[in-house]
Amino acid sequence: MKPGAEIVQLGMDHRELPMTAPLRRVTLIVPVFNEEGGIGPFLAKVDSVIADLAQVVTFDILFVNDGSRDATERHVLAEAAKRTDVSLINLSRNFGKEAALIAGLNNATGDAVIPLDVDLQDPPEVIHQMIDRWTAGAKVVNARRSRRSGDTWLKAKSANAFYRIFNALSEQPIPRDVGDFRLMDREVVDVINQLGERSRCNKSLFSWVGFETVEVTYERPAREIGETRWNYWKLWKLALDAIFSSSTVPLRIWTYFGMMMAVVSLIYSLFIVAQTVLFGIDVPGYASTVILILVFGGLNMFALGIIGEYVGRIYTEVRQRPLYVIRSQHTSAKAEQ
Ligand code: UDP
Ligand code: MG
């Protein structure tokens, strides 16, 4: 017998039967940027996946239109008119996927959220396993790519290097090969929404918040429709953001390096003084002088550059600008419940 059924039988009003708890709702957060061709196939795929879960949870789909210049908005609105579970946030311009995702997290209303890409590179089938683990009590379910069949050799290698460097520097490591595709319980989303930092890397914030985390694996397919919006320059900037926003080790390196150089310099100075006293002034030494000037000039600039990275981020923080600007919002009836 289901818990609760007994109470109802004892109660006076039998019209309340059957008493089942309302299903929990999961919001799929989908950032889209110039993806007019992807909306239809994406929804078709998602529908086929969530149909099997109808007894377990309900879903709503929140598209965040990240300043698309094509007909993405129109396509989403057309779909939203046909169904009750689609809503749309239009950002005022292209703010980048990270910001679009935050806009989604701030506005999602579900009991859990799952951010996923519209290009089906985050296979919706994995949602099944995520929901299983969530209903079993996990607060965060990470989806780890077991094989990056969709990525080039260089991208896979550079991603590897990034994880290695990041995890060596940061106090809270981020799991390897886990992207934004993950399930997060409302409790976790509320904490993430409270983090007010401007220059941010979602992945590192997601792992920073903690909570009971489990993992499911999947194979990442190649992009089916459209083209990737990432290039190596953008990925490089993202990697720098990730490292500098989660670690102060690059700053501290210079403290130790400076201390080491001070000791070496002292020893060398003593040596020169002793040499001068014992053997008189030795004029030649042009090469070594120039080399020292060049080497230390270079290191000074590098160190200043690292400090600059942090100063720049401090500047971004103190300006307190919002991470994104919403132009309009179309909320479906179902999401408002
Ligand atoms: N995206 C976005 N804003 C951007 C770039 C991308 O909202 O400035 C969205 C894009 O529409 C897609 C997701 O982010 O749904 C992932 O983008 P993409 O497939 O280009 O990245 P990749 O899979 O290559 O990492
Ligand atoms: Mg993609």
Image: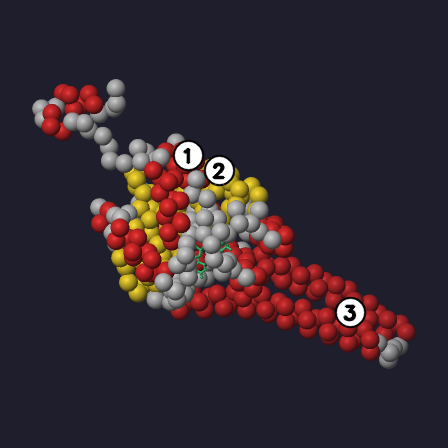
Secondary structure of the residue carrying tag 1 is: helix
Instruction: Identify the mark nearer the N-term, 2 or 1.
Output: 1
- The N terminus, quarter of image: top left
Disc 3 element: helix
Crowding at mark 3 (Cα within 10 Å: few <14, some 14-19, many 20+)? few
Looking at the image, is mark 3 or mark 2 nearer the viewer? 2
Contact between labelled residues 1 and 3, with CB atoms less than 8 Å apart: no
Corner quadrant of residue 331: bottom left
Is ligand 1 closer than 8 angstroms to the Cβ of mark 1? Answer: no
Tell me whether the residue at label 2 lies in contact with that at label 1, contact meaning CB atoms closer than 8 angstroms. yes
What whole-number distance in Å separates the C-alpha atoms at marks 3 and 1? 64 Å
Query: Mark 3 or mark 1: which is in front?
Result: 1
Give coordinates of residue 63: x percent, y percent: 35, 54
**Label 2: few (<14), some or many (≥20) within 10 Å?**
some
Residue 126 position, x and y percent, is 45, 40
> What amino acid is at disc 3?
Ser
Asked whether 5 or 29 is in front, the reply is 29
**Mark toward the start of the polypeptide (3 vs 2):** 2
Q: Position of residue 163 (x, y in %)?
A: 58, 50
**Mark 3 lies within 8 Å of ligand 1 (Cβ measured):** no
Q: CA distance from mark 3 to mark 2?
A: 59 Å
Q: Residue at x 33, y 56 (%)?
A: 76
Residue type indicated by callout 1:
Arg
Q: Identify the residue at the far right of this view.
A: 279
Q: Which mark is residue 216?
A: 2
The three-letter amino acid code for the residue at tag 2 is Val
Q: Secondary structure at mark 2?
A: strand
Q: Is residue 264 above or below residue 140?
A: below
What residue is drawn where x is 56% and y is 41%? 146
Instruction: Determine whether label 3 and label 2 are within 8 Å by CB.
Output: no
**Which label belongs to residue 269?**
3
